[in-house]
Image (tube, rainbow, N blue to C red):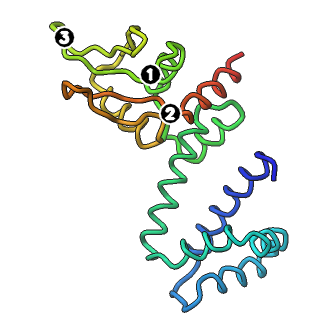
Amino acid sequence: MDPLNSVSSISSIIGLILNFKSEQRSMSEDEFKEFMSWLDSKRHKRLIEEINSNHQLGQGIKMLLNENHELVMEKLTTLDKSITLLASKISGLKEISYAISPNLDLSEQAISIIKQLDKSNGSYFQELKILGGTGYITDSNTSIEINEPRFVDDDLAQLCNLEFLRPDRSRNGDRMFRLTRSASEYVRLINEDEL
């Protein structure tokens, strides 16, 4: 399966599971069987064939459907918000993202933080308490510029929730944030849109 189809498939499956769980009033003994019947009634023949031919996909869906309804809905809602946040900075998708969730946006400062770290070719930056306040220095000895210090913790938390940064601690106990491959790929995607 090519990457575009897999992205399309995962978002389709997640959306369909979310719709199925939202419509479902009562829990049944075999949620997977109910889901497959529901897909059939909605005429998703191709997806049914894909699920039936891919054992790992079928098992993953069964496991998810067997979880507590509220927990599944919470996971799917969190994922939906993450996708909306990511789409909010990609041309062609940002308009859709804004139309669906106008208050859900990845801040310019958050984007700037991962762009600066990626551009520095560093793998992490460290928070240092200095005389004039707080500084952020990468492992390649470049500073991360912070324009809105009062919201930096919110931005860092959001970047960690999206798994663009991984929180860590230095030997001295200072906070560190490690860049992930996903963040670097996202920065490349945004940069391509800006060209």
Q: Which of the 4 image quarters holds residue 99?
A: top right
Q: Which residue is mark 2?
A: 180
Mark positioned earlier in the residue sequence (2 or 1): 1
| Nearest the eye: 64 or 109 | 64
The image shows residue 156 at horizontal and vertical percentages of 36, 32
| Nearest the eye: 41 or 6 | 6
Q: Is residue 179 left or right of residue 186?
A: left
- Which numbered circle lies on residue 113? 1
Q: Which of the 4 image quarters holds residue 168?
A: top left
Residues under labels 1 and 3: Cα distance? 19 Å
Residues under labels 2 and 1: Cα distance? 13 Å
Q: Is residue 152 left or right of residue 99?
A: left
Kind of residue sitting beneath label 2: Thr
The image shows residue 3 at horizontal and vertical percentages of 76, 46
Element class at badge 1: helix
* Callout 2 crowding tier (Cα within 10 Å): few <14, some 14–19, many ≥20: some
- Which numbered circle lies on residue 130? 3
Residues under labels 3 and 2: Cα distance? 27 Å
| Discs 1, 3 touching: Cβ within 8 Å | no
Mark positioned earlier in the residue sequence (3 or 2): 3
Kind of residue sitting beneath label 1: Ile
For image coordinates 43% across by 34% down, the residue present is 165
Q: Nearer the viewer, mark 3 or mark 2?
A: 2
| Discs 2, 1 touching: Cβ within 8 Å | no
Mark positioned earlier in the residue sequence (1 or 3): 1
For image coordinates 79% across by 68% down, the residue present is 50
| Nearest the eye: 177 or 144 | 177
